Image (cartoon, rainbow, N blue to C red):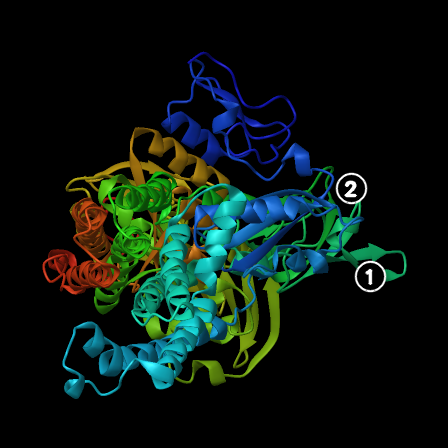
Amino acid sequence: MTATSRDDGDGACSLCSLPTPDPPVTASDVDGRYCCRGCLHVARSLGRDATDEIDPDEAIDTGADPERADGETAYLAVDGMHCSTCEAFLEARATDREGVEAASASYASGLVRLAFDPERVDADALPEVLSGTGYRAREAGTETDDDEGLGRLLVGLFFGMMTMLWYVLFLYPAYLGLPPRLQLFSLSGVDGAYLLWNVAAFAGVVLGYTGYPILRGAYVSLRAGRPNMDLLVALASTTAFVYSIGTLLVGGTEVYFDVSVAIVLVVTLGNRYEDRVRERAAGHLGDLTEQRVDSARLRTGDGTETVPIDALEPGNELVVRAGERVPVDGVVVEGTAGLDRSLVTGESRPVRRTAGDEVTGGAAVTDGRLVVRVSEGAESTLDRLVSVLWEVQATRPGTQRLADRLAAVFVPLVVVGAAVTTLVHLGTGASVSDALLTGLAVLVVSCPCALGLATPLAIAAGVRESLERGVVVTDGDVFERAADADVVALDKTGTLTTGEMRVTDVLTDETDAEAVLARAAAVEQFADHPVARAIVDEAPVGSLDRAVEAFESHPGRGVSATVDGCPVVVGTADLLRDHGMTVPDGLGKRAAAGATDSHIASLVGWDGAIHGLVVSGDEPRRGWRGVVSTLATDRRVVVLSGDDEAATRRFADHPDVAETFAGVPPEAKAEVIDRLGADGQVAMVGDGSNDAPALAAADVGISLASGTRLAADAADAVVVDGDLDSVPDAFALTTETRRRVRENLAWAFVYNAVAVPSAALGLLNPLLAAVAMAASSLLVVGNSARSMSGAAGSRTATDGRQEPGRPLSRDDPGGVSG
């Protein structure tokens, strides 16, 4: 490719499109301008130099769609979507409404994104635009009421049972030609007519009420011009029902209401399985949108006032207090505070920001107070994450899309085949009744119950087996792709590490380590900082009950107080020097070593001398080495992190890690996944909310249960039980499940290849056709229900011990600092 850069001089990062600082981060060996060293490193690692072209069409969409620039965007969850036809129907329906400028539906997530003009259509009225014809829309992230779907199924099962009971007791004996003395009821006369019309009423409830979603799907497919499986199911069930009603009207007794009932119930049960598999994925954006800030505290001459985010203008000054999120990107003009940027950048440690520093929208203030000036063209980084997550998520195909594509050809062929069969039999001298029954048999026998159940039942079985092994599958689509993963990308913070700050070591001169920790905890209990919480969590018994006076926080440096009448200082070397203390050479070197390894080393001094050092950090997970080695057996393993290179050195040194990307913001993580995917399928293993775009961008997203709900819900997600050892099991289980799906689909197609010609030749009547259809479905059920005993269970026992904390050493990659 020829050399161009995506940066047009508008101040956007050439990798992730975030605003660049002034001057931007650049390098002579890499073309483009970048927002941070992490993006520059990623660009260099991906081979983006002066000979590379960056195709704008391959760039991440950060939500800046020109068609929607002047409008607003809303995300709605829609119940009732179950195929790609639904997407096309809802998109057309939405854009027919005045004020709705664009619509994009995602069957895989059950979400619709609308771009609308708030002056022409009210946001609260948007659910009404999509609701109707069996669809129910609601704001994304709100709970859904599943009672209606379950109620339809229960009603159908009850009336279906009544229908079949009447058939077994009264109709089948007559149809099979048993002697009148062995029949419980005669179908002739008024009594027989009364019985048959009762059966018709029972079957009508099943078809009209329980089968309504199927009939609706058939109607939608006709409106959208996309024949689907619902259309074929509806044709078979309604044809059997209408034929039977016609038979009763002319005085006949051989009816096929049982065929109609069986078709509807079998397909409804299959759809119910599929819906249960997808329901956890119905609110991918819910957790993230809950964290979005929609109002800000604007500083005025008389104090502050709360205003909507949309009302902010460049130059406005916003007051952000401890516990609140920064509304939009901007620059600090007053105050000093710690910022937790894990939601938007992936950094495992809070950072200090003071006057003149830039801050990102979505970052949470952990302590202190800031006044932030809104930048020109500023928006929230968190809002950009929402847009990025939607873009990569909405492009995912649903599990049944292959079947829907086949239906576009299969359904018309079956309908034409049934019609031709009927005409041929009429032309060869068959009666109208026999010809119609033969055509009906073709429709019934080709009804795709086995095809419709092949995927959801196998997936349901895979989900069940996975649950038993601590692996939760939240979207069935991953079963189609997990086995093909060529690259496994592992996030560092919260995945390869625990994601929580904890005390890893206490180093002292000659003072008892417990005494050092006790005095540090007595002071830190009044501080609001992750390191303080880690120290307090390790506090010896009674240390928090000491008399503490004159507590003082020194932002960015530490804390001090008087404990039992003795001045105690906890923090950086500079802070303790300011209090007249000399840092011993040994402790100073170890403090510096800890700081370069993303650990935080807090010196502790009292009585005018420094007595110890408390090291806090994010520890590696148990067994991470063995897991990496197992995954690398037939895949390439890479590591992504929002932290710097020093913090990722331990993992980069692992012989089975092919490459490490450090200092990578969330948008760039998604870009890395996208670029890695150019050479094959990519699986992403992550934990924190900042990884959601990368999890969604990957072909397979795997998150740890100890992480955030957002990570667990992102795109095609697999959630393991918090034990990293479960990740290899996830790949084994998904591979076996995919094999079951393919076996079921193969059987379904073989069945149709044999059964349809048999019915067309008149070898099957509608009842036998229904039996054959049910038998094929039972085979699919049986194959899906088989145990996957050999699919998993190979834990990485050789590396299952928790790595003990050891003294800081740059030469020991397995220790705390390595």
Residue at image x 44%, y 55%?
A: 82
Question: x%, y% of residue 488?
Answer: 28, 43
Answer above or below: position of 133 versus 402. Answer: below
Residue 305's label in the rendered image is: 1
Front residue of 467 and 379: 467
Question: x%, y% of residue 564?
Answer: 52, 81
Q: Residues within 10 Å of mark 1 (few under 14, many from 20)?
A: few
With 93 as the anchor, is 748 left or right in this view?
A: left
Question: x%, y% of residue 527?
Answer: 55, 69
With 139 as the anchor, is 637 left or right in this view?
A: left
Front residue of 754 and 84: 754
* Helix, strand or loop under label 2: loop
With 495 as the anchor, is 143 left or right in this view?
A: right
Residue farthest right in this picture: 302
Residue 793: which quarter of the image? bottom left
> Is residue 360 something one can see in this rendering?
no
Front residue of 69 and 402: 402
Residue 242: which quarter of the image? bottom left
> Is residue 66 something one can see in this rendering?
yes
Q: Which residue is mark 2?
A: 314
Q: Are marks 1 and 2 in contact (CB under 8 Å)?
A: no
Residue 520's label in the rendered image is: none
Q: Residues within 10 Å of mark 2 (few under 14, many from 20)?
A: few
* Helix, strand or loop under label 1: strand
Q: Find the distance from the CA under tag 1 to the CA under tag 2.
A: 17 Å
Q: Quadrant of the N terminus?
A: top left
Q: Three-letter amino acid code at disc 1?
A: Glu
Residue 583: which quarter of the image? bottom left
Question: x%, y% of residue 725?
Answer: 21, 58
With 742 as the anchor, is 555 left or right in this view?
A: right
Front residue of 557 and 369: 369
Question: Which mark is first along the chain, 2 or 1?
Answer: 1
